[in-house]
Image (cartoon, rainbow, N blue to C red):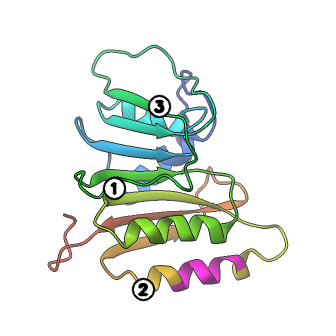
Amino acid sequence: MRMKDDPQAPSRSYLKVEEAFFRMNEWPQTGQRVVDLGAAPGGWTLAFAKRGCHVIAVDNGPLKLPAPGPGWGTVEHRTTDGVTFQWPADDPPVDWLVADMLVPPVQAAAMLSRWLKSPSMQRFVINIKLPQGSPILALRPLQHMLNQHNGFQVDIRHLYHDREEVTLMGRSATPSGKPR
């Protein structure tokens, strides 16, 4: 599904998260809390902020966001490493965990596994960069890890706007199967 570009977006990656919302049939809502790991330059942060979300943008690099418009949420930039960032256990869960980081699949899987083991999030959108040699082999440990976390409904797709990557999309499920 080709998404409409936003001329204010600081990067093409904005289109990837917009397509993920479409595929999940779920869009961010005003007031939701978001953690964006590997946020710079800010394409994914923009997608949430312009919908009124409170975004914690985690990246050592600078954000290149446009000036906030009417109805925008807030952006808190934390200059630290997105892979090792820890959500405080006593804070309420985030509504969305998102990440588009240039890290090996095994490192992205370990980061996501840590988040899945704690009640720290309701939904996630994570891009996994695939190696050129054998992308399917790189996904096997990730699939194994996801199979061990049955509290989430998960989809893995190669989206239109993805390049050498796949997108993991998931939502927490209650016993009834409905998102929390």
Above or below: residue 39 compared with residue 139: above
Bin the neighbour count of mark 2 within 10 Å (Cα to Cα): few under 14, some 14-19, many 20 and up: few
Could you tell me which residue is drawn at 44 percent across and 35 percent down?
A: 47
Q: Are marks 3 and 1 in contact (CB under 8 Å)?
A: no
Q: Nearer the viewer, residue 63 or 139?
A: 63
In the image: residue 84, left or right of residue 133: left
Query: Which tag, 2 or 1, sits closer to the chain's start?
Result: 1
Query: Which tag, 3 or 1, sits closer to the chain's start?
Result: 1
Query: Which tag, 2 or 3, sits closer to the chain's start?
Result: 3
Amino acid type at image mark 2: Gln
Residue 170 position within the rendered picture, expressed as x and y whole percent measured from the top left: 39, 66
Image disc number at residue 77 = 3
Q: CA distance from mark 3 to mark 1?
A: 28 Å
Numbered circles on residues, count = 3
Residue that lies at the very extreme toward the left in this rendered image: 176
Could you tell me which residue is drawn at 18 percent across and 74 percent down?
A: 174
Residue 15 position within the rendered picture, expressed as x and y whole percent measured from the top left: 55, 41
Q: Nearer the viewer, residue 117 or 175?
A: 117
Amino acid type at image mark 3: His
Q: Which mark's residue is nearer the viewer, 3 or 1? A: 3
Image disc number at residue 148 = 2
Q: Which residues are magenta?
A: 138-144
